[in-house]
């Protein structure tokens, strides 16, 4: 048990944006929402999963929709009370704590804001260990848990509860309502007991995000090695490419951000080409026509000078970035995990090969 204040929020937002693999929304927007709540209501208590009673009601809080739309539409702050009341009434018991459903610049921050405004603790766990674009793409699905009852509300006060037959149906129905509500909404889903949390959640994701963020902030102050070497060491990342953004193709379809970013090699990669395709999160990384990483491994773009993560909605022509791969949470590499989030699910014509195996045969620095 420890407190999350303004300084911790800065680092968590930075680290979670890296783990968001390009998705999860703008960390600056998420940070502003969380900081505003903490300034007004005080710091948030962060619980280790082992500290949560087995019969406690734990509720993940998240934003659903296209992150670029949230940047324009915003979030009012009253949504958390609406979600709390809907869930408490449905289960007939008080919510014990909130938690994030994924790592990302926005969805790591909204549970902090919700906990601050509702006076509840937050649990140091999530359901992905990164970010994915669809609701059923969580470790809880592999554990046989239901996404519903799922509570949904928008900033105008519209609200609904879904009770669905599968988690994929939750995604389909909620996505349609999200579009009707303007492309982004606040949701509570996969409401669970403390016992289920301990069994299926990705533990200590908030702490990992904070440590990554702190390391990125201090990367140039480390005494040994270059900043790039230090970044790759503490992130346990695989360097795939370094280049200048030459083109960005982007469109919003079905409350998702789809697109492709093309990179022109710089430094030791001069004369070479790479591209990354994304659906909210980065899906594939291709260097000189060879696939070097796919989902569910994390494909991240970071600034070559600051090593701050660059989300898909912040990609712009001329920016110099390093393409980095991070290994995913081990459960995603199982057969059940790959059926949920493997490359073929997203329409990529390749089987999943672990990042470290692809890099052994690729022309890249590891």
Image (cartoon, grey):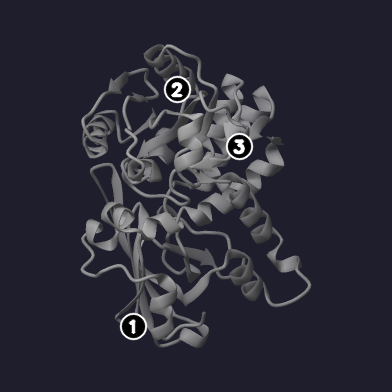
- Classed neighbour count for the residue bearing mark 3: other residues with Cα under 10 Å, few (<14), some (14–19), many (≥20): some
Q: Could you say whether the residue bearing mark 2 is in a helix, strand or loop?
A: helix
- N-terminal label among 3 and 1: 3
Residue 107 shown left or right of residue 36 in the figure: left
Can residue 23 be seen in this snapshot? Answer: yes
Coordinates of residue 308 in the picture (x, y in percent)? 57, 60
Foreground mark, 2 or 3, reads 3
Q: Could you say whether the residue bearing mark 3 is in a helix, strand or loop?
A: helix
Residue 276 shown left or right of residue 84 in the figure: left
- N-terminal label among 1 and 2: 2
Which quadrant holds the N terminus?
top right
Q: Which residue is label 1 attached to?
A: 288
Coordinates of residue 134 in the picture (x, y in percent)? 31, 44
Q: Residue at point 43% right, 35% down? A: 62
- Classed neighbour count for the residue bearing mark 1: other residues with Cα under 10 Å, few (<14), some (14–19), many (≥20): few
Q: CA distance from mark 1 to mark 2?
A: 46 Å
The answer to whether residue 207 is above or below residue 121 is: below
Can residue 249 be seen in this snapshot? Answer: no
- N-terminal label among 2 and 3: 3
Q: Residue at point 50% right, 55% down? A: 19
Q: CA distance from mark 3 to mark 1?
A: 46 Å
Q: Which residue is label 2 attached to?
A: 79
Coordinates of residue 311 in the picture (x, y in percent)? 45, 55
Q: Residue at point 47% right, 40% down? A: 199
């Amino acid at each position: 048990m420890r407190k999350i204040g303004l300084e911790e929020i800065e680092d968590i937002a930075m680290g979670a944006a890296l783990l968001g693999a390009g998705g999860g929304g703008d960390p600056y927007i998420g940070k502003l929402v969380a900081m505003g709540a903490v300034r007004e209501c005080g710091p948030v208590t962060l619980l280790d999963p082992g500290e949560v009673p087995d019969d406690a009601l734990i509720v993940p809080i998240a934003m659903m929709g296209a992150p670029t739309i949230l940047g324009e539409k915003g979030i009012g702050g009253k949504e958390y009370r609406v979600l709390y009341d809907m869930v408490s009434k449905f289960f007939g018991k008080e919510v014990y704590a909130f938690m994030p459903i994924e790592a990302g610049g926005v969805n790591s921050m909204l549970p902090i804001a919700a906990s601050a405004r509702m006076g509840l603790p937050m649990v140091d766990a999530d359901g992905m260990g990164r970010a994915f674009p669809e609701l059923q793409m969580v470790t809880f699905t592999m554990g046989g848990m239901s996404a519903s009852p799922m509570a949904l509300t928008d900033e105008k006060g519209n609200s609904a509860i879904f009770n669905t037959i599968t988690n994929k149906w939750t995604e389909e129905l909620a996505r349609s309502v999200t579009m009707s509500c303007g492309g982004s909404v606040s949701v509570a889903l996969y409401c669970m007991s403390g016992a289920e949390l301990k069994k299926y959640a990705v533990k200590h994701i908030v702490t990992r995000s904070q440590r990554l963020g702190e390391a990125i902030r201090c990367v140039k102050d480390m005494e040994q090695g270059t900043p790039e070497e230090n970044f790759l060491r503490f992130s346990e990342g695989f360097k795939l490419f370094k280049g200048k953004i030459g083109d960005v193709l982007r469109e919003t379809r079905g409350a998702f951000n789809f697109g492709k970013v093309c990179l022109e090699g710089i430094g030791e990669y001069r004369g070479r080409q790479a591209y990354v395709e994304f659906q909210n999160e980065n899906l594939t990384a291709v260097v000189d026509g060879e696939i070097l990483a796919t989902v569910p491994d994390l494909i991240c773009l970071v600034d070559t000078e600051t090593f701050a993560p660059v989300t898909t909605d912040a990609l712009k022509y001329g920016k110099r970035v390093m393409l980095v791969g991070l290994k995913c949470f081990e459960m995603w590499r199982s057969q059940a995990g790959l059926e949920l989030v493997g490359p073929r699910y997203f329409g990529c014509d390749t089987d999943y090969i672990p990042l470290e195996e692809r890099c052994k045969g690729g022309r890249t620095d590891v």
